[in-house]
Every structure is written in C-alpha cells, then in structure tokens.
Image: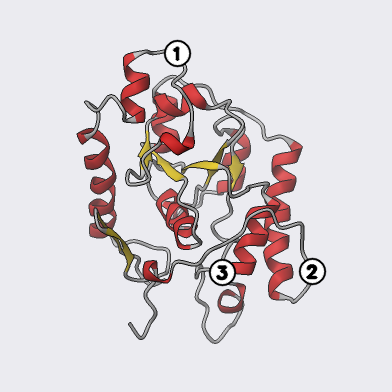
C-alpha cells in the first residue's frame, strides 16, 4: 500500500496521497497535530472539551453548528454529554493492519460506543482498483456516487453531525474524517483518544450490536458494490460535493 500523508494548516487541508496506510513518522506527526490543537484549546470556554470538563455530568448546549469546523476533534466528555442528540451520529471506523490479526467488525459487535454505526474502511472504497488484479490498490477513494450510496445506506444525511473513532485511539478514524471532507461534509470530528480513551474515562460501551446496525453495515457494502456493477441503488439521503483541492493525483 502506498503511504498517506495528511497535512493541515490554518489556511486549509491538503492531501498528498490518497491511499490508506501511514508511515510511522507521519502517523506520529498527524497524531501530535490532533492532540496539540486539542489541548491548546482546553482553556477556551467555547471549546467543546472545556464545556464538559467544567460541569461533569451535565449536558452541554448541543448544536453541531456551534462546533468549530477548524478543530478536527471533540473530547470523550463532550461526546458523552451529547450522545443522545438526534442530529449526531457516531461512526466506528476501526481498521487494523493484516499482521495484527484483528477483525474490526467482530470487535465492533463485542464492544462499541452506544448507537455507533460501523464504517467499513475496506468496503467503502474504489472497487474498480481493489478488484483489478493488474493494479490491486485497496482503499482508494470511491466515486462520488458510490460514496453517497454507501453513506446513505448507513442512514447518514447531510444535516447530521458525525463523530468518528477507532479502536486504536487515532488511526483509521482520521482517514474517514478526510473522506467525508473530500466529499464536502465538514460537520465531522474525530473522537480524541478514540475507543481506548472512552473506556479509560469510565464510559460504558455496548456489548452487542443491534440487528439494525449490522444490516446497515452490510447494506452499505452492498450499495457500493451495486454502483460499480451499474445497478440501481437508493434511496440516496447524502449528497456529495467533491473538493478537488483535498486530493492529489499521481501526476501531481
């Protein structure tokens, strides 16, 4: 797999390559970017992590419109305080390297944040490159139509605010954050520390996945496959708006 490097400045975000795996150095830099920006803002009373740390057990005034689109993370305290809000959806985007021998969907069914949907990083990808034996390029961005179909099958709409996490703390969640940004959805944040921090903070997890959540995960994978096979899918509840400045081609 090619390496992925995501650099973010206050002037914008640019992606250097569009594949999935990160080099060790890049992963460290990307992780420090998230944590540096998060902890620098802890004294800001308008930052979501500040609100819940000052009043533990109380609910912050919720509105995804009030969250800063320039800050890529929210705290576990903020998510816990606002988890039941109807216009907020949580995504489990766990993914592991093959040599780790971990199955993300099985781990999701054993333990996940209550109400979280499973986002299949392997499945929501460009099938034309992944299935072509001449190229074998997994995790390439899907087409706009395919992404819209897959996300719609999960029950996600453009009005939704999204919080994405993974089982390692900060790894594959950042990839999914970028994917939504590429397709024009800015109302997405990475959970600071992911599932490990959620659990060490003492917050509960669900130990079994609902039938509806499993069906949605399966439907999402089936929807993207149908798009690449030229079949009809629907209904489409998520409209994409491709942001070309966030992707660099091989030629670039």
Q: Position of residue 18 (x, y in %)?
A: 41, 69
Whichever of callouts 1 and 2 sits on the residue coming sooner in the sequence is 1
Element on which disc 2 rests: loop
The x, y position of residue 65, in whole percent, is: 46, 38
The label nearer to you, 1 versus 3, is 1
Q: Residue 58 — which label?
A: 1
**What residue would you read off at disc 2?**
232
Q: Is residue 6 above or below residue 130?
A: above
Residue shown at the point (56%, 78%) measured from the top left: 129
Mark 3 or 2: in front is 2
Gap between marks 1 and 2 measured at Cα: 46 Å
Of mark 3 and mark 2, the one earlier in the sequence is 3
Q: Which residue is mark 3?
A: 142
User: What colour scheme governs how the chains and residues are painted in the rendered image of this protein?
Assistant: secondary structure
**Local secondary structure at mark 1:** loop
Q: Residue at x 46, y 62 (%)?
A: 182
């Amino acid at each position: 797999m090619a390496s992925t490097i995501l650099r973010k400045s206050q002037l914008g975000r640019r992606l250097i390559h569009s594949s999935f795996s990160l080099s060790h150095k890049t992963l460290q830099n990307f992780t420090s970017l998230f944590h540096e920006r998060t902890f620098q803002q802890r004294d800001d009373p308008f930052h979501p992590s500040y609100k819940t740390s000052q009043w533990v057990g109380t609910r912050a005034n919720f509105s995804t419109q009030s969250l800063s689109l320039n800050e890529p993370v929210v705290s576990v305290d903020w998510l816990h305080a606002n988890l039941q809000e109807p216009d907020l959806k949580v995504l489990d985007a766990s993914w592991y390297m093959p040599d780790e021998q971990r199955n993300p969907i099985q781990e999701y069914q054993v333990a996940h944040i209550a109400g979280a949907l499973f986002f299949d990083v392997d499945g929501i990808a460009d099938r034309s490159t992944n299935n072509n034996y001449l190229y074998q390029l997994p995790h390439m961005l899907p087409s706009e139509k395919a992404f819209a179909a897959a996300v719609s099958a999960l029950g996600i709409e453009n009005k939704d605010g999204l919080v994405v996490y993974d089982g390692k703390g900060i790894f594959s969640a950042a990839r999914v954050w970028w994917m939504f940004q590429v397709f024009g959805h800015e109302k997405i944040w990475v959970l600071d520390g992911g599932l490990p921090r959620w659990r060490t903070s003492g917050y509960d997890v669900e130990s079994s996945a609902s039938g509806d959540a499993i069906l949605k995960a399966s439907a999402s994978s089936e929807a993207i496959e149908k798009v690449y096979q030229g079949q009809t899918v629907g209904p489409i509840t998520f409209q994409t708006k491709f942001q070309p400045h966030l992707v660099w081609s091989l030629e670039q």
